[in-house]
């Protein structure tokens, strides 16, 4: 790997390639969480209730989840340039379609396209990282990747909230479409990285798709790690990505822009903690201890947020900690990489990412249904008690993740 950096790619080009692919992740995260600050407007303009909003938003995760294994297989076998370019284009076209939505049907179809294109983003960055950097740096680079994703999510809340107040949600989406088109052209023109340049190829000549997939799913540790990742991403996919802003408006009586700003502290916590947790794990030569400490901190912080009316400063601090706790999910990709052979690393990473994003498909609509509880439309968002009974699912996710890490996941550091 060191010779790869010295002879095949300059340090500048290596960073450039990583940066280009990472911006796709930044973009898709902004697209993913944008409905959280559009909740009231979407419910009004599309004439849907909380469950309808939760379902429409979660459709994104259905196609995202379904495309994870195919994305891993494609990245294990083909050059990333064409795959990533087409993925960005599909995500951008879905965003454009969503801007014209006038019903839950059209909105859901658009979110389906957005999710299908976005499905390639996180896997793309991790595969390029695994190919271009030494194995000992993978945990740290995964953390940095998660940090960039979190900043993308922050861009999908606070800045978009400001844009909404000036141009409305449809025109805001058109701006995202323009960014997506520019990114599509940039990737096609500049992403010259080819897999056949990689010394340590991810392709195993004697292992077909069925065999490699069977190898991954037959390993219990891969499932345990995936379960942990799913549970610890639930707070981000359901609260930070959708229900957090309307909950803070309802329970803490904040304005929408203020609520979006405070809620973005979860993404900030995730952004800052992810690389730090990766570096700490490497320094300690321990993967599992940081996992259950993360889940424990998250459970305590989120429990306080649900149960007490807090000052704005304390609320921001606890949201920061609740988001930072979810950085254990980023570390799970290091475990799953170390737990599987190099020949199937992209597919293994994709499988873990599938478990991560399925949390949004599961939690978003169920929480929406619990919030409604007899109230329909925007009125359902005015009842803090109903919000809490839905968000207890998020608290439960932190708690169960803690016990999974403590009792089921085995150490992989040093492999």
Image (tube, rainbow, N blue to C red):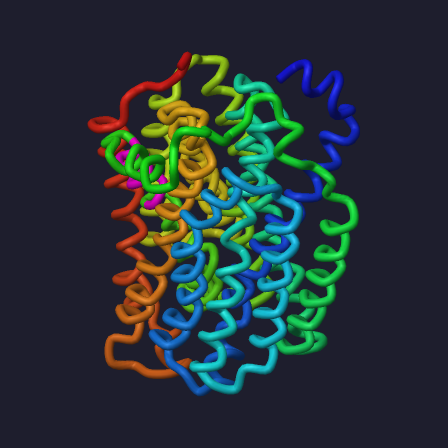
- Quarter of the C terminus within the rendering: top left
Residue 162 % position (x, y): 67, 66
Q: Residue at x 30, y 75 (%)?
A: 372
Q: On screen, 319 above or below 404?
A: below
Residue 371 % position (x, y): 30, 70
Which residue is nearer to you in this view: 103 or 201?
201
Q: On screen, 37 above or below 346?
A: below
Residue 252 seen in the figure: no
Q: Residue at x 33, y 69 (%)?
A: 368
Q: Residue at x 53, y 25 (%)?
A: 138
- Residues in magenta? 222-230
Q: Is residue 369 left or right of residue 56?
A: left
Residue at the front extreme, as displayed: 206
Q: Is residue 318 left or right of residue 100?
A: left
Residue 74 % position (x, y): 50, 45
- Quarter of the N terminus within the rendering: top right
Q: Is residue 23 left or right of residue 40?
A: right
Residue 135 seen in the figure: yes
Q: Quadrant of residue 193?
A: top right
Q: Main secondary structure of the magenta part?
A: helix
Q: Quadrant of residue 191?
A: top right
Which residue is nearer to you in this view: 196 or 284?
196
Q: Residue at x 24, y 34 (%)?
A: 218
Residue 413 % position (x, y): 40, 16
Find out whether residue 146 is within the magenta segment. no
Find out whether residue 229 is within the magenta segment. yes
């Amino acid at each position: 790997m060191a010779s790869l950096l010295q002879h095949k790619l300059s340090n500048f080009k290596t960073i450039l390639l990583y940066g280009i692919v990472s911006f796709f992740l930044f973009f898709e995260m902004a697209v993913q969480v944008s409905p959280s600050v559009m909740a009231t407007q979407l419910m009004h303009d599309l004439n849907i209730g909380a469950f309808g909003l939760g379902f429409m938003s979660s459709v994104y995760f259905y196609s995202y989840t379904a495309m994870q294994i195919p994305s891993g297989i494609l990245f294990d076998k083909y050059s990333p340039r064409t795959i990533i370019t087409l993925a960005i284009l599909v995500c951008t076209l879905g965003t454009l379609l969503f801007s014209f939505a006038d019903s839950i049907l059209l909105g859901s179809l658009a979110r389906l396209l957005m999710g299908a294109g976005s499905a390639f983003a996180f896997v793309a960055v991790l595969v390029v990282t695994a190919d271009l950097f030494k194995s000992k740096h993978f945990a740290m680079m995964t953390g940095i990747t998660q940090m960039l994703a979190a900043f993308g999510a922050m861009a999908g809340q606070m800045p978009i909230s400001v844009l909404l107040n000036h141009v409305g949600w449809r025109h805001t989406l058109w701006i995202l479409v323009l960014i997506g088109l520019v990114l599509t052209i940039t990737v096609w023109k500049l992403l010259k990285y080819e897999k056949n340049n990689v010394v340590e190829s991810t392709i195993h000549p004697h292992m077909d798709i069925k065999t490699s997939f069977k190898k991954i799913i037959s390993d219990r540790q891969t499932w345990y790690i995936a379960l942990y990742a799913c549970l610890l991403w639930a707070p981000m996919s359901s609260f930070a990505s959708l229900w957090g802003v309307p909950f803070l408006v309802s329970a803490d009586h904040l304005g929408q822009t203020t609520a979006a700003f405070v809620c973005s502290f979860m993404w900030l916590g995730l952004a800052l903690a992810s690389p730090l947790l990766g570096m700490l794990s490497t320094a300690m030569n321990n993967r599992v201890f940081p996992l259950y400490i993360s889940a424990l901190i998250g459970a305590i912080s989120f429990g306080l947020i649900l149960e007490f009316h807090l000052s704005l400063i304390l609320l921001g601090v606890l949201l920061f900690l609740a988001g930072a706790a979810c950085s254990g999910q980023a570390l799970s990709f290091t475990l799953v990489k170390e737990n599987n052979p190099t020949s199937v690393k992209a597919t293994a990473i994709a499988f873990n990412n599938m478990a991560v994003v399925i949390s949004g498909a599961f939690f978003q609509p169920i929480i929406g249904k619990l919030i409604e509880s007899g109230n329909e439309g925007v009125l359902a968002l005015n009842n803090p008690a109903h919000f809490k009974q839905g968000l207890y699912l998020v608290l439960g996710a932190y708690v169960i993740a803690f016990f999974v890490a403590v009792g089921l996941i085995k150490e992989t550091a040093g492999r």
